[in-house]
Amino acid sequence: MATDLTAEQAIENAALKSDRFRLEREADWMRLEDIVTKMEKGKARQLSDDDVLALPTLYRTLLSSLSIARESSLDAGLIDYLEGLSLRAYFMVYGTQTSFGQWLKGFFGGGWSQSIREIKLDIWIALFVMIAGTLIGYVLVAGDSDWYYALVPGNFADTRVPGASEAALRETLFSTEDHDGLGVFAAYLFSNNAQVAILAFALGFAFAVPSILLLIHNMALLGAMVWVFAQRDLTVEFIGWLSIHGTTELFAILLAGAAGIHVGRSIAFPGAKSHLKAASDAGKRAALVMAGVVIMLICAGLLEGFARQLINDTGLRYLVGGAMLTFWLVYFFAFGRNRVEERP
Amino acid sequence: MTSTTTDPWIRRSNNTKLDRIMVSPEGVPLNVTVATAGARAGALTLDIIIILGLILGVTLLGFLALWGFEAAFDDNIVLEESGPLSVVAVLWIISVFLFRNAYFLYFELGDRAATWGKRAVGIRVAARDGGRLTAEAVIARNIIRDIELFLPLVFISSGEADGSMSDFTAWAGFLWVLMFLLFPLFNKDRLRCGDLIAGTWVIQNVKRNLDGVVAPSAELSADPTTGKTTSRYEFSDADLSVYGEFELQTLESVLRTGTDEALATVTASICNKIGWEPGSGDERIFLEAYYTALRAKLERGMRFGKRRKDKFSQDI
């Protein structure tokens, strides 16, 4: 049997040119398979430097072996093996090679800002929709205060209803009691808002229409609330109360909605690209924006859970809110403009 | 991206409808097989069970921690909104958020691009265009998962729990889930909405071992002193021209895995075809010799750019 023979004898004895071809290269394939198997098992660190350096070369050699085998060998088992190994090696060579740390560096170092600048048009659309939504809410409730109950879900309303006294409303803005459990509150707000933002984005899939409706609905709720406070001349205080976390949170929701609109718009109007290509390009761009939105919502949750409850002065609230807004604007639209285009 | 395999007569998967070609960045077409809907459903079910298990585990752990606090400092401590309870609550909220949103992300960003469920059924995520699977793509495909799966699940279960669910919303939620769950069945690449947005697809893992040379002993009647090889069987050109590649590869699989009985059957039918008298006891040697001779002939033809698909095609 062949196993009794040395490799050289086996090559010499092989009757077929294609078998000789195989026996000559088998050792390299085995070595590559060994490397790939280790990497697949997450044991890439056990690989020697030699093996790591050899991987791309072995992979390219394998691809050429595969091409040759396809054109010159009729050994189906061999071709099957080469096909399978090529695919596995391809995934290792072209896998997600950036480590999480590196990705994060690129993300904060300009990738995030850049993706936001790329969807500028959608941000304008979303901003317009949000302002319109607020006005609609305000005007509707101003016209007929019953609208308030239709727009605002029960758990928000409590004392903040049309006709509430100034004292009661002021109380909701400046209550100083129960500082306990702020952490829980912040965590809950974050997880809840993040889920809403993800929803606003994901719904954009249906040609952006649901995203827009969701933005309008949420902002109408805000508009209705503004009217309630405006009735008791508390507009300035209310907006201060809102702005401390609102500049961050509303900005995040704006971006999430814009990302959804971006995807929906690209599916509806793909331009010169195919629908699939346009959808996936837009999806990847929007995914970066969304990763950032989640981070912004963590900030907003902390601001809302802690800062808003601890800072009780309207002026100071405006200061914090304004500072956050300025920070985001500068970071998104002025930072990393000269960054070299790296993304494919 | 074309949708046929390079060599249709090299059989790869049981369901050839799912075989695709992906061109590697080097320009070499690689055969891939799209994961079946069943495999994906199985993987998803496993993953959901695992996520639920993780959430349950964290919840139990939280109760255990609280119970521990209570046991350590006596019952006087009021476990309300402060101290240990709030810490545990924060951790719980954050971990549930992470399980729901980061479980898929974490695993699909790894080298194997597959969650535990996907690994168990042997499938993985890949970029549809044959390029690198980027972090953005993995994020995108998993954000969409939220509306496809978690949103309606949470919506239906919470509506059911507080009894506010009307028949209409129940049916709407059900249709919603159905629409997204069945989406992969209505396109040929079995793409989920998330795959569509991210430019990814889910394909089958391959792991095949390299079997030995099919007919290693075909020429072993070589004379060790002279090194000259002579075969015990000689086939004429006419003997070899009755079969094509399809029959050759069928013979190969018989030689690799066949029983003695199968070998005898095949020997009989080949002998019958070429007009030989089938002997007995020597089937493997005979078949290996025939295999080697036939493959040599067909491969010679390939080198001149002539392929013979099966016995019905014209002889080369």
Image (cartoon, helix red, strand yellow):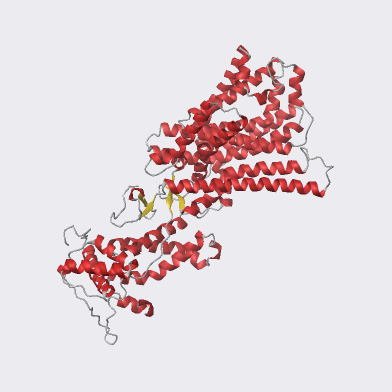
Residue A88 lies left or right of residue A287; in this view the side is left
Q: How many marks?
A: 0
Task: Identify whether B115 is placed above or below A211.
Answer: below
Residue visible at 46% across and 39% down in the picture: B181
Quarter of the rendering occupied by the N terminus of chain A: bottom left
* Residue A131, quarter of the rendered image: top right
Image location (x, y in percent) of residue B256: 34, 67
Residue visible at 58% across and 40% down in the picture: A292
Residue visible at 54% across and 43% down in the picture: A111
* Residue B238, quarter of the rendered image: bottom left
Closest to the observer, A32 or B286: B286
Closest to the observer, B282 or A164: B282
Task: Identify whether A172 is placed above or below A339.
Answer: above
Closest to the observer, B253 or B226: B253
Residue B91 lies left or right of residue B242; in this view the side is right
**Residue A340 in sight in this render:** no
Image location (x, y in percent) of residue B315: 16, 61
**Residue B75 in sight in this render:** yes
Which residue is at the far bottom? Answer: B225
Image location (x, y in percent) of residue A206: 46, 31
Image location (x, y in percent) of residue A207: 45, 30
Residue A266 lies left or right of residue A247; in this view the side is left
Task: Identify whether B52 is placed above or below B270.
Answer: above
